[in-house]
Amino acid sequence: MDQYLIILLYIQIALCFFCLVRIIRGPTIPDRMVGIDIFGILVVGICVILAVLTNRMFIIDIGIAWVILSFIGTLTLAKYLGGKKLNE
């Protein structure tokens, strides 16, 4: 069972590098934002796998905090790209 989780961990890390390429080379700002969102999802997956492998459940709290910050950042960028001010 642990072998499969380690393989999944390596796959998640490899996918993070693909997202970093999209973030760096993205032709438009929305493409980069999608890359950042997917990167955040992959980091949360990595946190969950590490929590299960090491039996330290506080790592899931780190993943939850990452999701909340990512969601707030996505909302802020969407509002900015929509042409509205951030205080509206």
Image (cartoon, grey):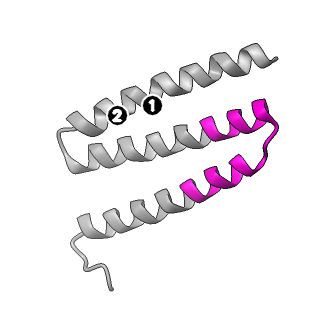
Measured as percent of width and height from the top left, residue 70 is found at 47, 57
Amino acid type, mark 2: Leu
Q: Counting other residues with Cα less than 10 Å from the Cα at mark 1, is it few (<14), some (14-19), or many (20 or more)?
A: many
Q: Is residue 39 left or right of residue 55?
A: left
Task: State the quadrant of the C terminus.
Answer: bottom left
Report the span colored magenta: 46-66
* Residue 29 in magenta stretch: no
Residue 26 % position (x, y): 22, 38
Q: Amino acid at mark 1?
A: Cys
Task: Out of 45 and 85, give the one closest to the viewer.
Answer: 45
Q: Toward which corner of the image does residue 35 lie, by quadrant?
A: top left
Residue sitting farthest toward the left:
27
The disc at residue 16 is: 1
Crowd rating for badge 2 (residues with CA inside 10 Å; few <14, some 14–19, many 20+):
some
In three-dimensional space, the C-alpha distance between marks 1 and 2, rounded to whole angstroms, equals 6 Å
Q: Which residue is mark 2?
A: 20
56 to 65, vertically: above or below:
above
Which residue is found at the position 68% from the left and 19% from the top?
Answer: 6
Asked if the stretch drawn in magenta spans residue 53, the answer is yes
Determine whether the residue tagged by mark 2 lies in a helix, strand or loop: helix
Task: Where is residue 20? Give x, y as percent.
Answer: 34, 34
Residue drawn at x 55%, y 20% is 11
- Dots 1, 2 in contact, CB < 8 A: yes
